[in-house]
Image (cartoon, helix red, strand yellow):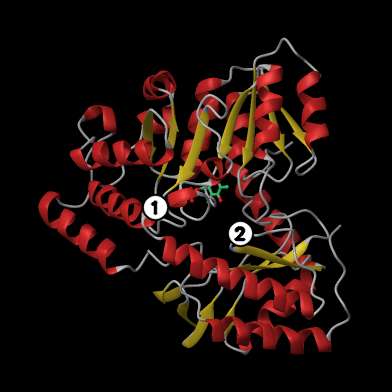
Amino acid sequence: MPRTNLIERLAQRQAECARNGLLRRLRTVTAIDSTSIILDGKHLRSFASNDYLGLAAHPYLRQALIEAARDWGVGATAAHLLGGHRAAHAELEEELADWTGRERVLLYSSGFMANLGVIDALLERGESCVQDRLNHASLLDGARLAGAHLKRYPHLDMDGAARQLARSTDTPTLLASDGVFSMDGDITPLPHLARLCARQQATLLIDDAHGLGVLGPQGAGSLAAAGLDSTQVPILMATLGKALGVGGAFVAGSAELIEGLGQFSRPHIYTTAMPPALAAASLTAVRLTRHADDRRESLRQRIEQFRSGARQLGLALGDSFTPIQPLWVGAADTALAWSRALEEAGFYVPAIRPPTVPEGQARLRVALSAQHKHTEVEQLLDTLASLARRTAPVASAD
Ligand SMILES: *Cc1c(COP(=O)(O)O)cnc(C)c1O
């Protein structure tokens, strides 16, 4: 028997996706700012960005990055433990700890690496990792990397979570969940999860990639909004590339946790530290975000405007009060058709299809920003109205 050619097998998988109309398409975009892009030569209003507060192109962030690059150059030149850890990193860690109300913080180069790094450092082979079925791919992969026993529960189902925890009460267990779900925009019942974990002596990890900057006092995130401290939620992970508009990520918690991760979290140790200029820009982003109640208020108004308009049109909205507003359309090709029609009308709203979301739950993922104008959301709703008139009414996902 000849050995399977791995690249051919990959090509066959791709051909299979193409046959099912599920190929992902990479498109090169020129971003003017968070709400306006040029795609294939055409100016579009973007409803696709995670830059919820409009900080990615903020003049203070640009200035911080430029000045830091001028003073220290671009790259960190080494891993944190081998000379790559600069004053800008240290200052950013301190500011993030103060903001999130945690003792200490450890930086990672990306959120994906942070989730791999924290789960792999904590769990040993054969131990349990209980997770919401719709958790981000990096949380699921973290459990795989650790060789842990992954036990998933139905989305937001606290009885399901309790059942998974009760199945092996003597196995060390980490329960991990998105705070705000990246494709659905809904929020996990945090106080409930915290109580459950306390009762079952499981360790709780919350990934607040989409809550940080947007929710809670000073935008400190979904845990701050729920009033949960580090005894109730000992591990907080969040990213700097969404509402903060930069890139990179961090884990926040007790000094004990952070010291341990610094020693044993391989995706932190064996990688080049984030460019110090990005740490400086992130520090500026955090300071701006803490004082951005006006931006959070504009965002809240746009979310409300979009939801009430979509409801009047009879569109199938998700149960989300965050900037992530899924519009369920069901079939993958319908989602694609709507996305294309929106693009023709001047809006960029990507279709999200399996395998990113479960089969039959294809959707348009509308992401709102504090930078969207009232009239822009109105125009999007008008276009959706004409699409809805042309298409059969959409069915709700649940
Ligand atoms: C985006 C995202 C990540 C990954 O963060 P990056 O910094 O982009 O690698 C992790 N978790 C969730 C929930 C996310 O939405």
Mark sitting earlier along the chain (2/1): 1
Q: Going 13% across and 49% down the picture, which residue do you hit?
A: 72
- Which residue matches tag 1? 247
Residue type at mark 2 is: Thr
Q: Going 53% across and 52% down the picture, which residue do you hit?
A: 215
Residue type at mark 1 is: Gly
**Percent x, y for residue 316?**
80, 69
- Which residue matches tag 2? 322
Task: Work out whether 215 lies above or below 306.
Answer: above
Task: State which mark lies toward you, 2 or 1.
Answer: 2
Quarter of the rendering occupied by the N terminus: top right
Observer able to see residue 207: yes
Between residue 230 and residue 66, name the one nearer to us.
Answer: 230
Pointers 2 and 1 in contact (CB under 8 A)?
Answer: no
The answer to whether mark 1 is within 8 Å of ligand 1 is yes
Quarter of the rendering occupied by the C terminus: bottom right
